[in-house]
Image (cartoon, helix red, strand yellow):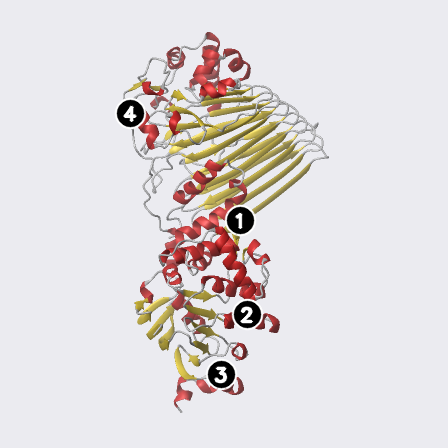
Amino acid sequence: MSTATKQIEELANTEYKYGFVTDTEQDIIPVGLNEDVVRLISSKKGEPEWLLDWRLKAFRAWLKMEEPHWQNVTFAPIDYQGVSYYAAPSEKKKLNSLDEVDPEIRATFDKLGIPIEEQKLLSNVAVDAVFDSVSVATTFRSKLAELGIIFCSFSEAVKDHPELVKQYVGSVVPHTDNYFAALNSAVFSDGSFVYIPKGVRCPMELSTYFRINAKNTGQFERTLIIADEGATVSYLEGCTAPMRDENQLHAAVVELVAHTDATIKYSTVQNWYPGDKNGKGGIYNFVTKRGICKGDRSKITWTQVETGSAVTWKYPSCILQGNDSVGEFYSVAVTNNFQQADTGTKMIHLGKNTRSTIVSKGISAGRGQNTYRGAVKIGKNASNARNYSQCDSLLIGDRCGAHTFPYLEIKNTTAKVEHEASTSKIGEDQIFYCESRGIAKEDAINMIVNGFCKEVFRELPMEFAVEAQKLLGISLEGSVG
Amino acid sequence: MLLEVKNLKVRVEDKEILKGINLTVKSGEVHAIMGPNGSGKSTFARALSGHPGYEITDGQVLYNGQDLLDMDPDERAREGVFMAFQYPVEIPGVNNAYFLKAALNAKRKQQGLDELDAMDFMKLVKEKLKLLHVDDSLLQRSVNEGFSGGEKKRNEIFHMAVLEPTLALLDETDSGLDIDALRVVSEGVNAMRSPERAFIVVTHYQRLLNYIVPDHVHVLSDGKIVRSGGRELALELEEKGYAGQTAAGARK
């Protein structure tokens, strides 16, 4: 390897700035997974019988399933028995005001920059802050309640709106869908629940922050968002996690349901701990996200900027059941050092005149391995379907990799499907050109990478776009030495 | 004294290309560096700009009294050194105007000046476009993406006009240009001539020097400056060629 390339490969030691731990007493059940643990989780949360049965069904199915290994990633075997499946801070009473929140927990949120106090919420974003496996506080609830909007933790929804939960949970991602969905269905702890009533446009972006805190606690979040006829909602999911040595499993399930004329936009900025620069530690992000455009003219948009996790495996997907429904996927995925990602999307066209757009930007640096897997399926009755896919890879340095596996399964002759792909490098000469104009190397890389990601950043809600650009800068620091 | 080059030796991929260059440049002057292929003309310009592939093995370069070789390339640029590339690279996705604004503001910040906001920047840019007789469609496009050879060279001069450097290195700016493009580029350079600015123009052919009239002409051969003179030297070279200008030949 020439000196010049070696310079490109030099890795900086960027402190993972969110790497800190809150020392607060936690109610953690011992490690291990069996039917008793499932019952324990359910009883700790005071769940109704039907939900316990639902969990047990999923658990029993999970026992019969095998961990999948078809993804283009390698990971150390997961010790499912060596993980604790529940951790809640010791607050037992219901919190009515923010003053009742454990001050340590509050301090954690402040450090993360989460504006939990209503006075600080100048940005008009309602935040459902999840601390480890239990939702701690919800803000702006009263304002949203005036419009009939339900935005609360999943656990609260089970208590306050059981009929809605029962109707929709598992309707988009059944527990039989895959191994990790089954596991999640058995042991999910909490997540967000959103219901937007008919004709209501949610006036603010809804947001959730996660944190994996206690050692050995995997995160099994379950989120359910329902937009009734003519409703609109934009939801932001952003995650941070502290430094850990053991790999931590994050197997969440997100289900979106959009009825006739409804629109759901789900944006994610993911910054889980990616492992140190030697590939040790880091989060396993194995998430199942799916949305169903149930009604005619409904629309679901997934936008994501993924820069963290040691191993990422996720395919936010859309089932385009309603006629004239639209599914969109805009993604930037970064792999640096030893990160691996096998991500993409599935667009399943069932109704008539459906449209899907896929724009995927993969950035590989260091020894990162980035795989895009996109499936476009056009059912035999899905007449007049249209899909446009664009999959671009950017390689930084010469020891990373980008792989593309597009699947097109078309069973209707009136379909129009377009697929474009490109691969490019950030060349030394491009960097030098920028430097010759007075632009420092890191700024040059940021500029070039941002130019590369423009089409995706354009689709992000504004606050997220700014955070995403910063995150991209941090995650690529030192990738071109 | 703007630039003092003392016994500069440069190696590229284990081959010594420059074997001891000595040159002084004052503000306001235009120096032409000419020479046959492989003499090291472009190497000289690139070494001054701080290109990573060029290893300095000996010598010193003082720029406004500062040690130039000790500065990173982006630092040199912010201090007022500008390089117009022979083969300008493309940067897709990065808007030309946005790029220049970032560059200009980086320089201004270094000089302790306020950064220009978008409006003031556009005002400045429009002035420069007029000065260079260049179309403003240049601003909408990504840096050099899809530009023809001539457009790329014109873009280099446009960058130079916006950044207002103190020392401009033009590396074979005329290569690949037709007569009209040559004229436009030369007019741009001439419009930028000032007592506060110096140019080092690297070129093969005398023709460019009809438009950009130099104060001094130097002939580079086999890594050394073998002859220096006024603009008539360029005409002499045009007539007699480089063959008689080797180090040995010059001593005769």
Same chain letter for marks 2 and 4: no
Same chain letter for marks 3 and 2: yes
Same chain letter for marks 3 and 4: no
The three-letter code of the residue at mark 2 reads Val
The residue sitting at 47% across, 48% down in the picture is: A449
Q: Nearer the viewer, mark 2 or mark 1?
A: 2
Q: Nearer the viewer, mark 4 or mark 1?
A: 4
* Residue at the disc numbered 3: B234
Mark sitting earlier along the chain (4/1): 4
The three-letter code of the residue at mark 3 reads Ala
- Residue B136's quadrant in the figure? bottom right
The tag on residue B185 is: 2
Relative to A129, A30 lies left or right: left
Chain letter belonging to callout 1 = A
Query: What is the spatial separation of the Cα atoms under label 4 and label 1, in whole angstroms?
Result: 47 Å
Residue A366 point in image, percent of width and height: 40, 47
